[in-house]
Each structure stands twice: as structure tokens, then as C-alpha cells.
């Protein structure tokens, strides 16, 4: 979604700037530091998918809800993007902040987070003002589940102190709950590793309620890995996931589906081969309200997955009885220690135009790959246009005959764009609706540490 107020880079207390570089820690901060080790830095990418130059204001907000400094202002040309490296912003002290972005044009944004000691990376999409609400759903909540623990970051998008309740759930019902008070505009980080009553080995979901509008994201961390995703205020009856792997150059995925409706639902996940668009099979699960189920695309002790080794494709998750669901895909490379996640797309929200804010070709040794999925019922043609920071189109690629349900993958270092490119891409379809996801790596997969970033492109 585009927005003139990009309401909340919601975890900027922990995501937008350095997690480990604060002078003192509040109780919540201490909990977060314990759960997610490392000294963190972040950058914010703002893209303008429109036809006129955008004037943008970026406000950093401290944990008490007060502004950290005067807003940072800049312009973004039409179809272009700009990156702000947070440690280089003059006058902003090391610390944890939430961010509110305002613009006179519709913009989209992503936040990138990297850490040292250990080396970890993640990216997440900003949350639009139109998408905040008084309840949020988190499909991935863990407490030391095979070493993984989650942290949920909640930002108060209202005008008064928010009284917030988190309910942790499995198929058996509520397991634990906790409350927070969050000042207006401020954020709070809740580490599930320290939640009273949440058992070791917990895997489940969370439902957040508030008396003020809020936005929420979640982090999942292990000793040397980090991923992130957005919570959701509402769901859809069908969700599309353009990146699904089983041992594809070492990458695997699993998909968590949360029922955000009020009664139980049966969901079906169908898998499609990128090369042909043909279904290779499906599987089902019944999910209770507020809870989530996990579907594995790689072989486990529970049995063989439907996708077989070498699979690269997509998935569509459907509620067979028209209940509202959300989904998140975890992307992992066990051999390299990579972990990342991205949010599924409500299938009905797909359009014939996709905008991706950050595309790189050896930009300080960072490179990206782009996956576009045709979620329509007929083949379509694509035009892929690369746009630099000045709004100038530097290259264009045409793709013909992309079959329904199939995906087109581009490894951007192989594209005819300048070495050192850091810009945006705009993809248009000749007819069928499309969606897109970008993976970003430091190097070519040969750099030690968790160096994988993943984000969802915007339908605009």
C-alpha cells in the first residue's frame, strides 16, 4: 500500500537505529538486548512510485514519545528511491527510535537493520497510517523454540497513552498474556523470552489489543540469526507467497498461517512451479481463531514435503470457508546461517504495477534478486524498469508470456545496470495482477554471518 503518512517504521525502538549502542537501558530495552545480541545500525529507504516529486519529512521519536530532533527533510523524484543511513544523520544520538514519515505524495518505505558481533541482517516494510488499528495479529511467536525467540515491537499511533494487551495462543487456546502502557508515538519492545507463563519451547501466535491505534512488527532471533515481519490488522480469504523453496541453491522456506477471524477455518496451501505455473500439490490444516499453523516446504521428521529438492516456486493459501487469514514465509539457508521472513500478499490486493524501493548491483558489495509472480488466471507480459536516485530510467527489460501462477526471477548483478547501482525498480504487467519480493545479500552468498535481507514490493 502507498501512503502519504507512512505511519510507522514500528520498531524503530530496536529496528531503525542501534540496538546495542545506547547509553542506558530501560527494563524493556534490557529485555530486548538480552534476546537480540549485537550492536545495530540501520538505514531507511523511501520510494516514490508516483508521477511527481515527493517532499518527505522523517521524524525520529524517543521511547517516551518525544521527538529526538527536528525532522529530517528531503525530496524523492518520481519513480525513484533514496536511502538514509541512520548513523550518519547529524544531531541524532545513538539509541532506539520509532519513526514517522510524512510526504506530500504517496510513498513506500523499508527499514534495513544490520548488527555486528554477531553479524545479522533483516529488513521490514513500513506500516501505513491506513493500516494501523486497535488490534494486531502476529503469526510467529516463539520462546526458545529450537533456539528461536521472538520479540514484538508495538508503536502507539494514537494521541494518548495506549493500554495494550498481548495474548499468546496455540491450538489449545490462550497460554499466557501480558500488558503494557505505551506513550503516544512511542514504541515498546516485548521479548517473549522473558514473558511470564510462556513455556520454554513455545511456538504459537499473538493477538494484540489496545485502546489506541497501534502498529506492530516482530523479530525472530537465534544466537547468530535474525528475521523480521509485519503484524497485520486484518486478513484476507486468499494470500499469495511468491518465494517458496526446497533445497534451491541451499534455501528452504516454511509458511506460518494465522486465522485472524472469530471461528475456526480450514486452509489449503497450493504450490506452483515457477517454470510452468502448474500446481505440484496442496495440503490443508484446520486453524483455531487467533492461532497459527506451520507448513514446511522441506523434509522434516514429520515426513516429506510436497515440494521436492531443487524446487523454486510460489504458493497460494486459501481459507476454504472464506475466513480471514494472514501468512508469513520464513526463508532460510542452513548452510550459510541465513534467516529472513516476508509477509504474504492478500491476493485481491495485487495490481498490474509493482514498485520495489531497493535494487542493488555491487553497491558496497550488496546485491539483490527480484521475484515477480503472476497471480492472475492468464499469461502476461512484464516491463521491468530500473530507476536511479535522480528518477532517471537506466535500463529496461521485457518479459513475455509469464504463465499464470508462475514466477520470474532476476539476479540483478546479471542485469545491464551500472555497477554500484542503488535504486528502484518499477514492474508493469500487460494484463494480469502481479506481486513481488526482493532478496538482498552482502556479496554473493560468500560472506560469513546472517547477511540476508528480504522485503515485499508495493502494489502501486
Image (cartoon, rainbow, N blue to C red):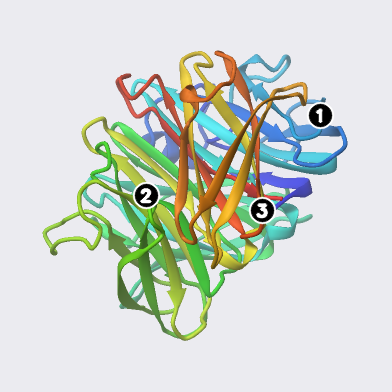
Task: Give how far apart the Cα atoms at labels 2 and 1 are.
Answer: 33 Å
User: Which of the labelled discs sits on residue 216, or is there none?
Assistant: none
Residue 18 image position (x, y, % from top left): 53, 25
- Label 1: which residue? 77
Task: Classify mark 3: residues with Cα within 10 Å, few (<14), some (14-19) or many (20+).
Answer: some
Please tell me which residue is depicted at 21% across the width and 33% down the height of the picture.
335
Please tell me which residue is depicted at 72% across the width and 14% down the height of the picture.
90
Task: Give how far apart the Cα atoms at labels 3 and 2 are.
Answer: 30 Å
Relative horizontal placement of residue 174, taking residue 440 as reference (left or right): left
Residue 387 vertical position relative to residue 199 in the rendered view, above or below = above
Residue 212 vertical position relative to residue 373 in the rendered view, above or below = below
Task: Give how far apart the Cα atoms at labels 1 and 3 are.
Answer: 25 Å
- Label 2: which residue? 330
Please tell me which residue is depicted at 59% across the width and 15% down the height of the picture.
418
Q: Is residue 370 at least partly visible in the picture?
A: yes
Q: Do the residues labelled 2 and 1 touch (CB within 8 Å)?
A: no
Q: Is residue 22 at least partly visible in the picture?
A: no
Tell me the SS state at disc 1: loop
- Quick one: label 1 or label 3, which is nearer the N terminus? 1
Quarter assignment of residue 247: top left
Tell me the SS state at disc 3: loop
Task: Classify mark 2: residues with Cα within 10 Å, few (<14), some (14-19) or many (20+).
Answer: many
- Quick one: label 3 or label 2, which is nearer the N terminus? 2
Task: Classify mark 1: residues with Cα within 10 Å, few (<14), some (14-19) or many (20+).
Answer: many
Relative horizontal placement of residue 102, taking residue 349 as reference (left or right): right
Please tell me which residue is depicted at 44% across the width and 65% down the height of the picture.
316
From the viewer's side, name the closer residue of 181 and 451: 451
From the viewer's side, name the closer residue of 242 and 10: 242
User: Which of the labelled discs sits on residue 430, or is there none?
Assistant: 3
Residue 393 image position (x, y, % from top left): 72, 26
Amino acid at each position: 500500500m502507498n501512503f502519504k503518512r507512512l505511519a510507522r517504521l514500528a520498531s524503530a525502538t530496536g529496528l531503525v537505529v542501534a540496538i546495542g549502542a545506547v547509553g542506558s537501558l530501560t527494563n524493556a530495552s534490557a529485555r530486548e538486548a538480552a534476546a537480540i545480541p549485537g550492536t545495530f545500525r540501520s538505514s531507511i529507504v523511501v520510494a516514490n512510485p508516483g508521477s511527481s516529486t515527493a517532499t518527505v519529512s522523517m521524524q525520529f521519536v524517543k521511547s517516551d514519545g518525544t521527538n529526538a530532533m527536528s525532522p529530517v527533510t528531503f525530496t524523492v523524484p518520481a519513480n525513484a528511491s533514496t536511502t538514509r543511513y541512520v548513523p550518519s544523520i547529524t544531531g541524532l544520538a545513538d539509541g532506539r527510535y520509532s519513526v514517522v514519515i510524512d510526504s506530500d505524495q504517496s510513498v513506500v518505505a523499508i527499514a534495513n537493520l544490520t548488527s555486528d558481533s554477531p553479524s545479522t541482517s533483516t529488513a521490514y516494510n513500513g506500516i501505513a497510517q491506513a493500516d494501523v488499528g486497535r488490534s494486531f495479529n502476529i503469526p510467529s511467536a516463539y520462546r526458545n523454540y529450537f533456539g528461536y525467540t521472538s520479540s514484538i515491537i508495538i508503536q502507539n499511533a494514537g494521541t494518548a497513552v495506549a493500554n495494550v494487551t498481548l495474548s499468546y495462543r496455540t491450538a489449545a487456546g490462550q497460554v499466557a498474556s501480558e500488558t503494557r502502557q505505551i506513550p503516544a508515538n512511542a514504541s515498546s519492545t516485548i521479548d517473549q523470552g522473558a514473558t511470564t507463563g510462556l513455556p520454554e519451547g513455545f511456538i504459537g501466535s499473538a493477538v494484540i489489543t489496545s485502546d489506541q491505534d497501534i502498529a506492530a512488527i516482530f523479530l525472530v532471533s537465534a544466537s547468530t540469526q535474525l528475521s523480521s515481519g509485519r503484524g497485520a490488522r486484518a486478513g484476507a480469504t486468499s494470500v499469495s507467497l511468491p518465494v517458496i523453496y526446497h533445497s534451491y541453491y541451499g534455501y528452504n522456506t516454511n509458511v506460518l498461517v494465522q486465522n485472524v477471524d472469530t471461528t475456526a477455518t480450514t486452509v489449503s496451501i497450493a504450490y506452483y512451479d515457477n517454470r510452468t505455473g502448474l500446481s505440484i500439490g496442496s495440503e490443508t490444516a484446520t486453524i483455531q481463531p487467533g492461532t497459527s499453523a506451520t507448513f514446511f516446504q522441506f523434509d522434516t521428521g514429520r515426513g516429506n514435503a510436497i515440494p521436492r529438492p531443487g524446487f523454486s516456486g510460489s504458493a497460494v493459501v486459501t481459507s476454504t470457508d472464506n475466513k480471514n487469514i494472514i501468512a508469513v514465509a520464513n526463508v532460510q539457508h542452513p548452510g550459510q546461517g541465513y534467516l529472513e521472513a516476508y509477509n504474504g500478499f492478500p491476493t485481491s490486493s495485487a495490481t498490474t504495477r509493482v514498485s520495489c524501493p531497493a535494487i542493488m548491483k555491487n553497491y558496497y558489495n550488496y546485491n539483490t534478486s527480484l521475484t515477480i509472480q503472476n497471480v492472475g488466471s492468464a499469461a502476461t507480459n512484464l516491463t521491468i524498469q530500473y530507476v536511479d536516485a535522480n528518477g532517471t530510467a537506466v535500463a529496461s527489460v521485457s518479459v513475455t508470456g509469464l504463465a499464470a501462477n508462475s514466477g520470474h526471477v532476476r539476479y540483478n548483478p546479471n542485469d545491464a545496470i551500472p555497477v554500484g547501482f542503488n535504486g528502484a525498480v518499477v514492474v508493469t504487467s500487460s494484463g494480469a495482477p502481479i506481486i513481488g519480493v526482493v532478496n538482498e545479500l552482502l556479496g554473493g552468498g560468500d560472506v560469513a554471518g546472517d547477511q540476508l535481507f528480504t522485503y515485499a514490493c508495493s502494489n502501486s
